Image (tube, grey):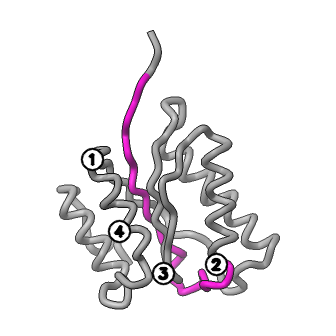
Amino acid sequence: MSTYTQILYHITFSTKQRGPALKKENRTKLFKYIWGLLENKNCHLYRINGVEDHLHIVTHLHPTIALSDLIKDIKLSTTDFIKNENLFPSFDGWQNGYGAFTHSISEKDRLIEYVKNQEEHHKKTSFKDEYIKLLKKHKIDFNENYLL
């Protein structure tokens, strides 16, 4: 029997201390690099976007890939890439941890649009407020003291 999955992940994580390091002019290079990482792991990227202090990734994971390993690989590889390419001079690393939320495939188009419109969205909402809303929506218990 073959393995079939359809698990749509919405992954988000921020820069260390939510520093506004991810300047717009080089974000596309970072996004393409992450896309390549996902492709090399046989994951399907639906959308990636972000603003100065955090990223959002909408992807389907290959069944052989553990979510925590994927995020660890993304963070380690992109940290090296950012430093080697000098993409974001004030980048000091990624936050510890991440948010990962599953969605029904029927929500895919709405989720892609949400991630696509991050710049507009964050003119009105901070990452912290957005993150708390996501945690509450997905009924995840959290301690606000750890949300910096």
Q: Mark 3 points at which residue?
A: 18
Q: Is mark 3 on a helix, strand or loop?
A: helix
Label 4 residue SS? helix
**Real-space CA distance between mark 2 and mark 4, rounded to the nearest whole angstrom:** 27 Å
Tell me the kind of residue under disc 4. Tyr
Front residue (pair 24, 88): 24
Residue type of the residue flagged with mark 3 = Arg
- Mark identifier at residue 114: 4
Tell me whether the residue at label 1 lies in contact with that at label 2, contact meaning CB atoms closer than 8 angstroms.
no
**Placement of the N terminus among the 4 image quadrants:** top left
Check if residue 75 falls in the magenta segment. Answer: no
Q: What residue type is labelled 1?
A: Ser
The residue under label 1 is: 106
CB atoms at circles 3 and 4 under 8 Å apart?
Answer: no
Work out how far the residue at label 2 is from the one at label 3, CA to CA, in angstroms: 10 Å
Please provide the residue range marked out in magenta: 4-26
Q: Is residue 66 above or below residue 113?
A: above
Q: Distance between the residues labelled 3 and 4?
A: 20 Å
Which one is closest to the eye, mark 1 or mark 2?
1
Rendered view: 114 above or below 92:
above
| Residue 64 x, y percent position in the rendering | 53, 30
Corner quadrant of residue 88: bottom right
Q: Position of residue 68 (x, y in %)?
A: 49, 46
**Residue occupying the point 66% across, 84% down:** 25
